[in-house]
Amino acid sequence: MKTTDRKGMNRRAFLKNGVAGTAAAMIATPALAESLMQMAKSEPPEFPAPVYRTLGRTGLKISTVSFGAMLTPEPEVLRVAFDHGVNYVNTSRKYMGGKNEITVGAAVKGIRDKVYIATKVLSESRTKADIIRDVETSLKTLGTDYIDVIQVHDLTGVTSALLAETKETLALLKKQGKVRFCGVTTHLNEVAVLNYLADDPDQFFDTCLVKYNFTSDKRVGTAISRAAKAGIGIIAMKTQVGGYDIAGLGKITQHQAALKWVLQNPDVTAAIPGMKDLTQLKEDIAVMGMSFTYADLRRLDRYAEAIAPFYCNFCGACEVGCPHGVEISTINRSLMYAEGGYRDIHLARTTYNELPQQTMASVCTGCQECTARCVNGLDIAAKMDRARKVLS
Ligand code: SF4
Ligand code: SF4
């Protein structure tokens, strides 16, 4: 290494590998420097020409691979993405104990007009006072005077979050210019939520951030299509089914194949894979413009086979079999945040602790035999036992 900056980064290699522009002027942390060094070893640089699609009736043209920032600790990583055409970022105040919005705010400084920011009100916020407080806090934390897409978070059905009060408050915030568009997010009962959005006579919500991947039920694809036809912008999350690292599946990684599978659906505007560092960024944005192939399908078959013994797709089908109302799907999602590719114990515990106490894994101790049945054959009692150990 010839010239090394104060954080140990070879800046010449950094620039040579296409990590140029405004990001180069930002300060690198030791973890980022390590990522950059890894990238410097690979030739040639692999930042593709970005591909854009229109986000439903919002009219926003956003990159098909957009940025899920939930796991990203450093603004420089986001900035590299923005320098290479990624122009939509999804964050939340609950990520990283509130620090994630600060990171996103730092990354868009000076280029705010080039990046669309989506964030969320907290899951439990449904009243006017709660929603206004959440939006004002996010504006302050992000260091911006408007949010492009504000999302009502984690809908599991079509009732509580869609109360007139929620809509009226969001409409007020729009009128005040504090938010531009409104959306929802959903991990459970996605079909019902998407159909609600499609059929809503007010056509109030403009976007839906929805769990969608190659393990999704076909009915989710059908509901996505309906919602997209009604003008809802569809953004896919949980696209890489936990981001588990399974070795030996080929040059195109299983994560890339999974992203390609989602983006082959023209009704999906974009995916927002979580990208912790430059290595993951490079891996994910490389798929923009690539086609989904038969080889990808084979790779996903092998990936599905490898994760089948432990992967829960949060379908919720087992929950009717539990007499105690344990929220098995959300508990398993929390466990995945802790032990899957996320490795984020804070996010895992935050998600878990949002559950009402009477539905947590701690309730699940008195059954002689678990009567909840997993459609994929998972041992639910063992999962709940693991959740108690990891998340409590
Ligand atoms: S063991 Fe737990 S998940 Fe299974 S039925 Fe009993 S309370 Fe429900
Ligand atoms: S444990 Fe099985 S049935 Fe229950 S949510 Fe997960 S995949 Fe669905």
Image (cartoon, rainbow, N blue to C red):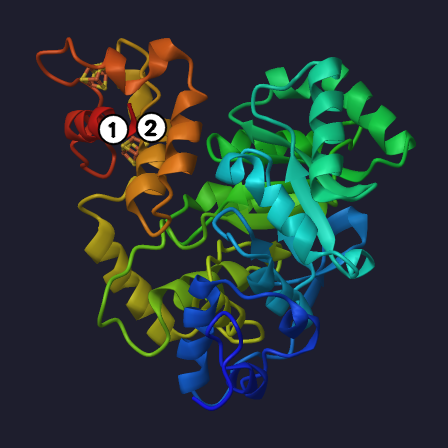
Quadrant assignment for the C terminus: top left
Task: Identify which residue is drawn at 48% across, 30% down.
Answer: 189
Asked whether mark 2 lies closer than 8 Å to ligand 1, one says: no
* Above/below status of 369 relative to 297: above
Task: Identify which residue is drawn at 52% across, 76% down.
Answer: 290
Secondary-structure class at tag 1 = helix
Q: Nearer the viewer, mark 1 or mark 2?
A: 1
Front one among 184 and 317: 184
Image location of residue 98, percent across then percent down: 57, 35
Image location of residue 211, percent across then percent down: 49, 43
Res. 200 visible in picture: no
Front one among 106 and 359: 106
Q: Which kind of residue does numbered mark 1 sit on?
A: Ala
How many residues crowd mark 1 within 10 Å: few (<14), some (14–19), many (20+)? Answer: many
Task: Identify which residue is drawn at 25% across, 28% down.
Answer: 387
Res. 126 visible in picture: yes
Residue holding disc 2:
331
* Residue 373: quarter of image: top left
Say whether marks 1 and 2 touch (CB < 8 Å). yes
Q: Which kind of residue does numbered mark 2 sit on?
A: Ile
Quadrant assignment for the N terminus: bottom left
* Above/below status of 103 relative to 219: below
Residue holding disc 1:
387
* Residue 313: quarter of image: top left
Task: Identify which residue is drawn at 75% across, 15% down.
Answer: 128
* Above/below status of 232 relative to 391: below
Mark with earlier residue (1, 2): 2
Image location of residue 285, percent across then percent down: 54, 69
- Of the four image quadrants, the one with ligand 2 is top left
Q: Residue furthest front?
A: 6
Secondary-structure class at tag 2 = helix
